[in-house]
């Protein structure tokens, strides 16, 4: 069956024609005015004539009174002594380090008038290559977090005097009756390491490392096979065949930004080089990486080891002990891997040493070491030692004191509760920025600086040294953890202007890195030649295989796979509203964690979406977790995201407080994210997810174009051959003069990670609206990523399933793809009589499509605005003028792409939306060049017109022509895989002009005749026309 | 700050409410009196004609009701309309002529006028940034470290300059900075305020457009106390954009515009012709 008939659907609601969703689809802004909320908590509001008059009278008088305000007096306060390089109104850019990656991540911070307002990846560094993921983008807000401690605390009392703090700590440690322990995250900073060493020496302390995500399986396997316990660098750009066993390397695994950039280099076929890598994903849950795979298979996580052994056996020519995938696919994978000898890569997410040893053996057979795997530039992601930490936990009871250096094991350690109990018997000293689970009861709380306020050197990758420099003066009275530890070792530590860590960093750069300190600060990183103590491969695949075979036992009940969400990760930075408002790339759920389950399992266990269940494992249980039905999820497995259920002291009253449930205690205790023998039990129902997948639906129209690589090789313009002539009622405007701004989005490069969404929100002051408003389809994001499912093609075309509600029963061929509203209606597989086969729900393809304002040259929104609030510019921009808008919402109704967002409320300085827009500190992150919109106006993507205007102005001041690359949008800048390209299509040498001529390039909904300025490049999947399924 | 103007509006509201209540009270008294008169009349008691009946009624009865009504309505429209117009202008934030007191009585007449110091000597960023920016105190100190104007104040430091010295922690007696002094920025009152919805960039106008400062700010060099010279209304912006030409000859950026202009045999391209009236040039 040909891909040309791909039928896409947004979610099960759409597929099964859920009446509520269908209703929503035709009424974009159907919600009534929220009178009840505005006018008090009256249970039922039966607005009659009298009420109307009351409201009317109230409004009139309110308006009259409000109008009495004269313009307030404003002040302008210049510097006393202006720093030489600061020009008020002009941004400065500094290379520094991003907070969310404990090991360090290179970024460039945009600073306006002394406050950082935007972070982007450092394009020079191989770790970023210009991209930055969603959580990294959002991390800027952790600097302006009102939950941060403003001062150090002694016995819970705030003090401003660090001398007092140091005295108290030294007294406490001197008087300690037992051993002193220091618990830190993995230390990649030589500065922090030196201060820990000093502290350990001064107090005879014991240093243990704690990380929630440890990659211990990989390190242990490499220790056994290569004699070096390291996490190697994987080079996805070198690989022609990639097989990932559950590793979500585009979303959360090790270094997703770098992997996305590298992976994409081999994923975009061009007429000159019409090839792309082949990516197989063999996994349990539907991960972001799985959605991007050419071919995806679901397996139970418990059998992962068996498949690895089978793959190894196939590659090594043995035929024993083979566990096959449907359609003998594993054999095919093995053959392809073998053919790509030296250009193949197999990765695996397991924390099981034996699994990783099998992966090592496979990669060794394939000759991957030295080509696609680099042991020298290994990644310093974690040094966590499960056993050492276990010993520490046992010793806590008798400990004299425990110093937590930004580690938070009470939250994320499997037996966190045990640790918390034990800590009550000792003295806790903490350096965390907020009062987290571990630092609830402290003797001394000495808050650390934010990484944007700190001097530091970090080594995220062997030989790759990041220099962190402060880009803002300290927001609060804090001190870097390294300085605190040094002070507590009895050394005098300078604070203020010549702070000690500044000197340490410059000394380290000149003495250890041997480069000019100014250059190092300018570049943000220093690269030295890297070597490791890894020897040649000396693994024993046979013993690992037999260990796997003996360890396997068929379990009872469900299998649980714990996973990280792209925006939340391990939960360390989970109090960030942007991370939660970002829809999960796969499920499109905001604000919640949940139990994801396959359609079949849900049916078999009588569960529906939104039912509450109790999940019990051997080590713990979670009550009241909602159920989400996930197409493409393996049967017999459930998934729960970690990183939720945080308990941080906060004064805010919003959806981030008490959000989701903590899944860490469900872990089996051996730091393994796979848990067997799980029971689930229905305890309630009726939960409504704030899920955006059915919002802003484009009604059954053909928005996606997809083809196979073979089709592309035959015809570069596959799927784009047919053009529908469109008549134009208006006089055509000549855009050939001046600039004509345009954007191209390569669907082969887009992974759907959501980085652009957060980047756009930060750049354009897009408000956070909260869970309740998202449920009402009122999220304000200017760019959304549509995620579509399509049923996998199936060779078995003769077998048909009877689908649809009984009154519209139709025979559909198994695996047939479905589209168009009327067809969709008949596609509910839940037939009335019997045939409850949901097999096709397990096997779905996924595509991601970012959609923002298409800046149509024949824009339907412009012609319907009664007040000309939205107009077209001579440069092809669809302009939105907020101060003219009266909020009729006609434009939104008439937009075929559903990209216009209405401000239902004033989101800034409004207690009902208690996010960063509602406090002085949080609003420091606002972009001063972009208006903060008020209630009652429409808004939408502006193509970052502020950047366009700024770049044009800079060119005019310099007296030169605008160059390609001078102008960029926030989304394009953020994209780790370079999927979005922006530029002037009238410049014949620009990248955008070339992409617009690319044969893959098409206009979304071309037949509507809107002539958009955004073009998409047809998605090409490297797969055969048909795949054999058993 | 915001507190005081909110309380102003509250005060206005209270006055209006008080007036309305007084009016109702007067009406009530009048009704009461009338009723009591009626009661007395019915009881047959002789009632003395009131002041109104004696003195006013006979005169008013002679007036033409139409003309009187028209006059009254006309007067009301004039008064209320005039008030409304003034109010409306203030409401949209037109502050033409706004000349607030400044913390330091800085004489532009002396600096820009008598001494002819270039505007951008102090407002350094006008040519390169969005903000013209009020000079930082160290700019003032470039001259006033030496120029203490003692000759004008009988050997003492000028009282206005003393405020500057206090702000930067400078001791004029010894002409040294006191390293321990508490410094504080000077809180100037902003005169030119644009609403958040309008983006204005000084460098675009000063450097690219070669607009004289005085074109918008008026004869600053003659202003003892600076006031807002222009309305800063959109119509005022648009007018200028319609009239002013772009210097296309001397800027590579406008090369294509220049070529087209020459090919059409024109000598002049206005800002408006180059898209300078489009919404998103200023509103985003």
Image: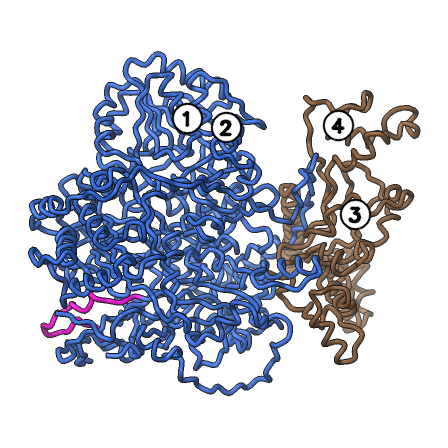
Chain colours: A blue, B brown
Please determine if labels 1 and 2 lie on a single subunit: yes
Horizontally, residue A553 falls left or right of residue A236, namely left
Return the residue nearer the eye: A229 or A95: A229
Q: CA distance from mark 2 to mark 3?
A: 41 Å
For the residue labelled by badge 1, is the local secondary structure a helix, a strand or a loop? helix
| CA neighbours of label 1 inside 10 A, class few (<14), some (14 to 19), many (20+) | some
Q: Is residue A111 visible?
A: yes
* Chain holding disc 2: A
Return the residue nearer the eye: B235 or A416: A416
Residue A725: % across, % down: 47, 87
For the residue labelled by badge 4, is the local secondary structure a helix, a strand or a loop? helix
Residue at image location 38% in from the left, 16% down from the top = A202
**Residue at label 3?**
B120
Q: Which residues are magenta?
A: A827-846
Q: Which mark is residue A504?
A: 2
For the residue labelled by badge 2, is the local secondary structure a helix, a strand or a loop? helix
Image-quadrant location for residue A877: bottom right
Residue A845 included in the magenta stretch of the image: yes
């Amino acid at each position: 069956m040909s891909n040309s008939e791909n039928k896409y659907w947004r979610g099960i609601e759409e597929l099964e024609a859920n009446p509520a969703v269908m209703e929503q689809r035709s009424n974009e802004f159907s919600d009534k005015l929220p009178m009840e909320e505005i006018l008090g908590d009256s249970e039922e509001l039966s607005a009659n004539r009298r009420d109307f008059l009351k409201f009317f009278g109230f409004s009139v008088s309110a308006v009259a009174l409000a109008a009495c305000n004269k313009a307030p007096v404003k002040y302008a306060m210049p510097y006393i002594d202006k720093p030489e390089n600061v020009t008020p109104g002009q941004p400065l850019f500094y290379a520094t380090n991003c907070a969310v990656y404990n090991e360090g991540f290179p970024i460039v911070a945009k600073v306006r008038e002394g406050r950082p307002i935007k972070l982007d990846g450092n394009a020079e560094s191989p770790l970023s290559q210009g991209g930055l993921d969603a959580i990294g983008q959002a991390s800027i807000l952790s600097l302006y977090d009102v939950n941060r401690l403003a001062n150090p605390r002694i016995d819970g009392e705030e003090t401003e005097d660090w001398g007092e703090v140091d005295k108290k700590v030294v007294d406490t440690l001197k008087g300690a009756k037992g051993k002193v322990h220091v618990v830190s995250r993995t230390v990649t900073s030589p500065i922090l390491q030196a201060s820990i060493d000093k502290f350990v020496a001064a107090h005879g302390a014991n240093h243990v490392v704690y990380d929630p995500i440890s990659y211990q399986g990989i390190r242990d396997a490499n220790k056994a096979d290569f004699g070096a316990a390291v996490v190697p660098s994987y080079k996805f750009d070198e690989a022609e065949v990639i097989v990932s066993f559950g590793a979500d390397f585009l979303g959360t695994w090790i270094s997703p930004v770098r992997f996305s950039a590298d992976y994409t280099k081999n994923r975009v076929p061009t007429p000159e080089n019409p090839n792309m890598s082949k990516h197989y994903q063999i996994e349990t849950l539907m991960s972001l990486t799985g959605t991007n795979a050419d071919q995806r298979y679901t397996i139970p996580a418990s059998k992962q080891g068996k498949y690895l052994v089978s793959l190894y056996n196939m590659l090594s020519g043995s035929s024993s002990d083979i566990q096959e995938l449907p359609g003998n696919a594993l054999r095919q994978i093995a053959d392809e891997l073998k053919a790509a000898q030296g250009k193949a890569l197999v990765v695996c997410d397991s924390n099981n040493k034996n699994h990783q040893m099998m992966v090592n053996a496979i990669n060794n057979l394939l000759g991957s070491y030295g080509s696609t795997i680099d042991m020298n530039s290994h990644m310093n992601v974690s040094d966590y030692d499960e056993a050492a930490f276990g010993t520490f936990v046992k010793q806590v009871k008798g400990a004299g004191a425990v110093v937590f250096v930004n580690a938070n094991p009470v939250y994320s350690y499997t037996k966190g509760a045990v640790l918390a109990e034990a800590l009550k018997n000792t003295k806790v000293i903490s350096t965390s920025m907020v009062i987290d689970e571990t630092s609830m009861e402290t003797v001394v709380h000495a808050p650390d600086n934010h990484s944007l306020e700190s001097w530091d050197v970090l080594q995220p990758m062997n030989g790759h040294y990041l220099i962190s420099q402060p880009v803002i003066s300290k927001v609060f009275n804090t001190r870097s953890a390294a300085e605190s530890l040094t002070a507590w070792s009895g050394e005098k530590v300078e604070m203020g202007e010549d702070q000690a860590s500044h000197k340490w960093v410059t000394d380290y750069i000149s003495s250890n890195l041997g480069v000019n300190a100014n250059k190092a600060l300018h570049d943000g990183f220093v690269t030295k030649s890297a070597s490791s103590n890894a020897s040649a491969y000396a693994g024993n695949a046979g013993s690992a295989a037999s260990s796997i075979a003996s360890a396997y036992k068929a379990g009872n009940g469900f299998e649980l796979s714990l996973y990280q969400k792209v925006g939340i990760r391990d939960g360390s930075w989970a109090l960030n509203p942007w991370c939660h408002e970002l829809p999960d790339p796969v499920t499109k759920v905001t604000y919640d964690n949940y139990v994801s389950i396959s359609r079949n399992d849900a049916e078999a266990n009588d569960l529906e979406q939104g039912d509450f269940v109790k999940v019990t494992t051997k080590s713990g249980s979670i009550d009241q977790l909602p159920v989400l039905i996930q197409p493409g999820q393996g049967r017999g497995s459930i998934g729960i995201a970690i990183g939720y259920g945080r308990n941080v002291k906060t004064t805010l009253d919003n959806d981030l407080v008490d959000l989701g449930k903590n899944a860490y205690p469900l872990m089996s205790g051996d730091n393994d994210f796979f848990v067997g023998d799980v029971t689930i039990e229905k305890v309630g129902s009726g939960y409504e997810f704030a899920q955006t997948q059915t919002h802003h639906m484009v009604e059954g129209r053909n928005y996606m174009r997809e083809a196979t690589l073979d089709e592309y090789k035959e015809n570069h313009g596959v799927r784009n051959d047919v053009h529908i002539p469109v008549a134009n009622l208006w006089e055509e405007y000549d855009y050939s003069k001046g600039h004509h701004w345009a954007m191209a989005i390569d669907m082969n490069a887009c992974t759907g990670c959501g980085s652009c969404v957060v980047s756009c929100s930060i750049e354009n002051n897009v408000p956070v609206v909260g869970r309740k408003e998202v449920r009402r389809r009122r999220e304000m994001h200017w760019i959304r990523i549509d995620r579509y499912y399509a049923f996998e093609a199936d060779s078995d075309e003769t077998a048909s399933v009877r689908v649809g509600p009984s009154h519209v029963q139709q025979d559909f061929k198994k695996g047939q793809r479905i589209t168009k509203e009327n067809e969709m209606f008949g596609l509910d597989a839940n037939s009335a009589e019997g045939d409850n086969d949901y097999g096709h729900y397990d096997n779905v393809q996924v595509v991601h499509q970012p959609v923002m304002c298409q800046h149509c040259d024949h824009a339907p929104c412009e012609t319907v605005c009664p007040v000309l609030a939205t107009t077209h510019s001579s440069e092809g921009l669809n302009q939105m003028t907020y101060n003219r808008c009266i909020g009729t919402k006609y434009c939104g109704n008439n937009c075929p792409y559903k990209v216009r967002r209405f401000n239902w409320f004033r989101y800034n300085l409004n207690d009902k939306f208690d996010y960063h827009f509602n406090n002085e500190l949080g609003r420091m992150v606002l972009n001063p060049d972009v208006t903060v919109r008020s209630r009652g106006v429409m808004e939408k993507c502006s193509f970052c017109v502020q950047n366009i205007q700024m770049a044009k102005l800079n060119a005019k001041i310099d007296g030169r022509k605008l160059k390609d690359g001078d102008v960029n949008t926030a989304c394009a800048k953020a994209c780790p895989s370079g999927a979005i390209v922006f530029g002037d299509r009238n410049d014949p040498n620009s990248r955008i002009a070339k992409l617009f001529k690319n044969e893959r390039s098409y206009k979304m909904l071309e037949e509507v005749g809107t002539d958009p300025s955004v073009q998409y490049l047809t998605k090409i999947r490297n797969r055969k026309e048909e795949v054999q399924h058993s | 700050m915001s507190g005081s103007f909110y309380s102003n509006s509250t005060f206005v509201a209270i006055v209006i409410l008080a007036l309305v209540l007084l009016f109702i009270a007067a009406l009530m008294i009048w009704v009461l009196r009338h009723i009591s008169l009626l009661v007395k009349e019915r009881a047959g008691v002789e009632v003395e004609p009131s002041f109104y009946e004696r003195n006013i009624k006979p005169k008013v009865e002679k007036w033409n009701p139409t003309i009187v009504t028209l006059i009254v309505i006309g007067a009301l429209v004039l008064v209320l309309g005039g008030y409304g117009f003034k109010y409306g202008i203030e409401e949209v934030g037109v502050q033409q002529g706004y000349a607030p007191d400044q913390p330091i009585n800085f004489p532009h007449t002396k600096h820009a006028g008598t001494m002819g110091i270039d505007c951008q000597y102090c407002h350094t960023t006008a040519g390169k940034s969005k903000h013209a920016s009020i000079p930082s105190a160290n700019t003032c100190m470039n001259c006033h470290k030496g120029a203490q104007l003692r000759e004008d104040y009988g050997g003492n430091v000028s009282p206005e300059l003393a405020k500057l010295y206090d702000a930067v922690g400078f001791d004029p007696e010894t002409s040294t900075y006191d390293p321990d002094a508490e410094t504080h920025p000077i809180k100037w009152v902003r005169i030119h305020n644009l609403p958040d919805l309008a983006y204005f960039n000084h460098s675009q106008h000063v450097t690219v457009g070669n607009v004289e400062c005085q074109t918008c700010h008026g004869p600053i060099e003659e202003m003892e106390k600076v006031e807002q010279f222009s309305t800063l209304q959109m119509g005022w912006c648009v007018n200028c954009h319609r009239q002013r030409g772009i210097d296309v000859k001397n800027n590579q950026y406008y090369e294509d515009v220049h070529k087209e202009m020459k090919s059409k045999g024109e000598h002049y391209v206005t800002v408006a012709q180059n898209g300078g009236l489009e919404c998103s040039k200023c509103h985003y």
